[in-house]
Amino acid sequence: MDMSPEEVKQFWRGYCERRKVSKDLVAKGEKKIDEDPEFWADQTMDELMKLVSN
């Protein structure tokens, strides 16, 4: 999927906002996205949530 790192983060933020996720978890997710934005562009945000929630 051709998404910039910022687009992936925007999608993540929207996902978190709709679920009323804490800012701390949003930041953790953004850090993971920064580590490998291409990977997270192809994954569901649900998978990222599972990763940062543990």
Image (cartoon, helix red, strand yellow):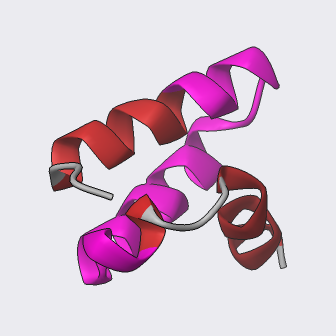
Could you say which is closer to the camera, residue 24 or residue 16?
16
Left-right relation of 40 to 31: right
Could you say which is closer to the camera, residue 1 or residue 27?
1
The residue located at (37%, 67%) in the rendering is 33
In the figure, 52 relative to 20: above or below?
below
Give the quarter of the figure containing the C terminus.
bottom right
Let me know if residue 2 is in the magenta part. no
Considering the whole magenta stretch, tell me its main secondary structure: helix
Q: On the image, which quarter does residue 7 sit in?
A: top left
Q: Measured from the top left, where is residue 28 in percent x and y?
A: 51, 63
Q: Measured from the top left, where is residue 8 in percent x and y?
A: 35, 47
The residue located at (78%, 56%) in the rendering is 46
Number of numbered discs overlaid on the protein picture: 0
In the figure, 15 relative to 54: above or below?
above
The residue located at (65%, 20%) in the rendering is 17
Highlighted magenta segment, given as a residue range: 14-39
Q: Measured from the top left, where is residue 9 in percent x and y?
A: 35, 44
Left-right relation of 42 to 36: right
Left-right relation of 40 to 18: left
Residue that extends furthest to the front in the rendered view of this protein: 1
Could you say which is closer to the camera, residue 32 or residue 40?
40
The residue located at (58%, 67%) in the rendering is 43
